[in-house]
Image (cartoon, helix red, strand yellow):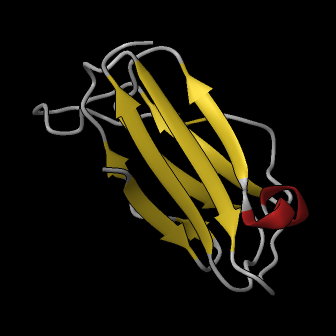
Amino acid sequence: MAKVTTLSSLGTSTPIMLDPVPKSTTIQVTVASGSSGSNIFAQFTLDDPSAPGTTVTWSNLSSAIVSSNADLNGAGATYTMLSPVGGLRLSSTTAVTGTVTLKALQAVTA
């Protein structure tokens, strides 16, 4: 079952914490009809936030996702990471109108 987080304002979404064992993670970023935002980033971490004393470091998975690119025919933008990932979130450096959704699905084989 896919895990989901959404972003509807400036800042970051609630992180999706993932199982760091699966070998691949596919994400889909979609923008609700009528929504907009030009500096939206899908971000990942390799850190395990449940470990005591861990400082989580986030990195951009891609260049900025322009809302028109993430909403082509409702399919969204899709990325596949072929290495373990600890967590995902959305981040925006400008105001977001509407809702941007990130879904993540993990697989134990690449």
Picture coordinates of residue 67, whole percent (x, y): 83, 65
The quadrant of the picture occupied by the C terminus is top left
Q: Up-down: is 29 above or below 26?
A: below
Is residue 102 found left or right of 79 in the rendered image? Answer: left
Residue placed most toward the observer, 50 or 84: 84
Query: Considering depth in this image, is 30 or 5 the residue closer to the camera?
Result: 30
Q: What residue is drawn where x is 80% and y is 39%?
A: 63
User: In the image, 110: left or right of 86?
Assistant: right
| Left or right of residue 63, residue 13 in this image | left
Q: Which residue is drawn at the image coordinates 41% and 60% (left, top)? A: 4
The residue drawn where x is 38% and y is 19% is 84
Can the viewer see residue 66 in this picture?
A: yes
**Residue 20 at what x, y percent from top left?**
28, 24
x then y, percent, for residue 36: 82, 77
Q: Residue furthest left?
A: 52
Say whether residue 58 is visible. Answer: no
Count of all numbered marks drawn on residues in the image: 0
Question: 96 or 93, which lies in front?
Answer: 96
Depth check, front residue: 53 or 8: 8
Q: Is residue 20 above or below residue 1?
A: above
Please identify the quarter of the rendering in which residue 78 is found.
top right
Residue 69's place in the image compared with 96, above or below, is above
In x, y percent, where is residue 59? 58, 33
Q: Residue at x 24, y 31 (%)?
A: 19
Task: Please determine whether, in this image, residue 83 is positioned above or below residue 30.
Answer: above
